[in-house]
Amino acid sequence: MADNPNPSPPADWRSASTTTPSLSVIVPAHRVQGYIRQCLESILACDLPNLEVIAVNDASPDRCGEILDEIAARDPRVRVRHLTENVGLGEARNIGLDMATGDYVWFFDSDDYATEGAVQAIVERLAQTRPDVLLFDYAREYWHGKVKRSVINDLFRVPPAPDVFTCAERPSVLRLMMTAWNRAIRREFLLGLGLRFSRGHYEDFNLTYPILMVAERISLLDQVCYIYRQRRRGAITKTRSQKHFDAFAQYDRVFAFMDQMGPEADQFRARMFDRTIWHLLVIIEADDRVPEADRARFFAGMSEVYRRYRPSDHVMPDDELLAKKYRLIVKNDYKGFERLHKKIRARKAAGKAKRKVKAFANNSKRRGMQVYYQTQLRRPIDENLAVYAAYWHRGYACNPAAIYEKAKELAPHIKGVWVVKPENVGDMPKGVPYVVHNSKDYWRLIARAKYFVNNVNFSNALVKRRGQIHVMTEHGTPLKRMGLDQLQYPAGGGTMDFDALIRRADRWDFHLSANPLTTEAWERSFPCDYEMLEIGYPRNDRLVRATDQERDRLRAELGIPEGKKAILYTPTHRDYRRDFAPMFDIRRFAQELGEEYVLLLRAHYFYKPEAEMWDRERVIDVSGHPSVEDLCIASDALLTDYSSIMFDYAVLPDRPIVIFANDWETYKLTRGVNFDLTEFPPGVVAYTEEDLLKSIRSGAPWGEAAARSRGAFRERFCPWEDGRASERAVRRVFLGENVPNPPQP
């Protein structure tokens, strides 16, 4: 991108109403690989040519830099600066400001995102009012799905705000959340003030308050333009740390600026003082911010701020409780403040405790948390006992089975026991220990075992004891949205209890990832405190090591006629449909393919396909086959729609993949996806049954173009599949070793 694609504004720039202002959006990024893609794509969704996005990779140790480069390669409006050492949010913003060329700058946090049409609306409002500062509304998006709009509309609607005003005319602007991301600032105005972001936390304050006090033109856009994501973890507001003491120095800078303003600042002092005390109270009263050992010192700092900056004409708040806190602060009575604070917390805790007791009693009745289990929970943990399960206790399968096999080899002292439903006991391989789900043996096992390995969650009734270790292996690469991401797609997550989902995920100690896309998705959709194991999927070790002899044996066992091409058809589950219904006429399709082919039908495990009048020599129903890895190795090509099996099948370098995307738009809208499969497919994409037949009969899936697509897909989504994923999992989880990273993409 050119350094400055837009002409410099004319001297009398406010009168140049015919010139659309240019906008620079500055986005520092550090440890936000699960969010940065959505952030930038939301900003770039408009087609404004006078927009530039300056992304500053603040030495992020994850894949933020790679994602930024990928997006910049697609959109010339994005410029990326990579820093070699972490400088912090404030300094990264300063670096972005120095690079900016736009008439206006918007400082954007990389784990948040813009609403639809926001950038266009902001630029249009800037063109209309030509302010020094444009304020716009935002909404908080909580991790559990609740979205709450801010107070900007309440502050300015009564009486209605004029198009342009000053802080003296509307001092209520000082009550706004003083972050940099809820405003666009005229760049020359900001540079002329010489203001910079500070180092440390709360770095916004010494810039965002002063610019409002001295701005000659402030304008308002009464529209939610910014979504402030209240993350479950990773935010400073959710971190118990001494870094919250930075707030004192930041407010010192604000009051020092007001001293430089002289008498003109006197009209703002009382409001600024109340705002400062209010914010310091928010910090100390939060249970997850100031460490217990530092609370008295923080309170003393508040008392010092009170004595130093209280204006002579300050009036005590009308609110009785707040006034009581003010009196304790001025006397530096920390013990009195703590007594008051604990009394308030005790009232809240009492209400929560009653609700928890009731919920626990109900849960015990529903889930069969019998006295026997409670007794077993008091017995010692067996350090050499592991629990395995897969697909809601359906049997021996997937990543847990691969880890179980490797653990027998590398950690033979660990006894593995599987949990299965009564109806699946007959499917268990000979010699594999198991217990029946919800039996007495089951409750004893989950009470005493050290390790838990599953590709789905264990039930809510399971109590995780101190010292127990949970491994979530997952069972696919998430093309579709998962976890908390489903909150926006009721068709897929409408009946899901997301609070319970996250409580189950909070038990995880390790979470497996198959590729960079998966890591991005897991960090965003399951924001919990686990170690991400970026090792590939253990179940795919078999695909890496598959031999011709194994393939011949499996084909014979499945009854695939010699000399025929076996196409494995694996349609995925569709949340907007209740039953299994092939997306095309299987009988006709198999007939028209010709004698050269046989179709292996693998229905999703949520469905039980009814008997069909198809030719058994042309269609083999393998829905009940215990191992999908067997089917992949035995087949000659894969036909699927949006099933995650495509990512595993791509491990096989010479096997074509055909995507039948006849309802892609519907699927995207109802379930949500993490990338556009039709723009980055693993091979041929067909949208109608006729095109599907033509493409296969023409040999296109085996052609050079399809091979190139498959190769790019494989490079992107199978970078860690080297046949050693199971070994890495066992060594890290059971043996406690720091395993080397797999080959990087």
Image (cartoon, helix red, strand yellow):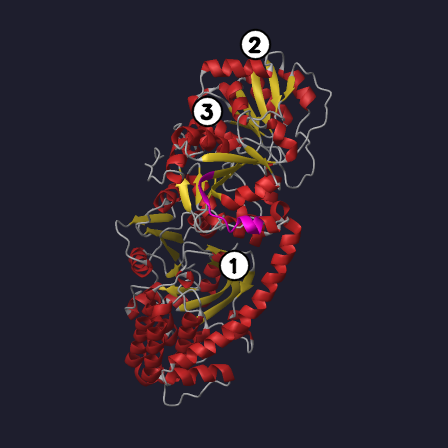
In the rendered image, the residue lying farthest to the bottom is 313
Q: CA distance from mark 2 to mark 3?
A: 22 Å
Q: CA distance from mark 2 to mark 1?
A: 57 Å
Tag 3: residue type?
Answer: Leu
Q: Is residue 446 left or right of residue 91?
A: right
> Label 3's element?
helix
Q: Which range of residues does the magenta coloring cover? A: 373-385
Q: Which residue is mark 2?
A: 562
Q: Which is nearer the N-term, disc 2 or disc 3?
A: 3
> Label 1's element?
strand
Q: Which residue is mark 1?
A: 142
Q: Which is nearer the N-term, disc 3 or disc 1?
A: 1
Inspect this view and state whether residue 255 appears. Answer: yes
- For the residue pair 190 and 437, the one nearer the viewer reads as 437
Image location (x, y in percent) of residue 271: 42, 80
Tag 1: residue type?
Answer: Tyr
Image location (x, y in percent) of residue 557: 57, 15
Can you tell which of label 2 and label 3 is closer to the viewer? Answer: 3
Image location (x, y in percent) of residue 70: 38, 41
Residue at x-position 40% and y-position 67%: 14
Q: Which residue is mark 3?
A: 543
In the rendered image, the residue lying farthest to the left is 84
Image location (x, y in percent) of residue 156: 52, 74
Mark 1 burial class by Cα count in 10 Å: few <14, some 14-19, many 20+: some
Q: Which is nearer the N-term, disc 2 or disc 1?
A: 1
Disc ID at residue 721? none
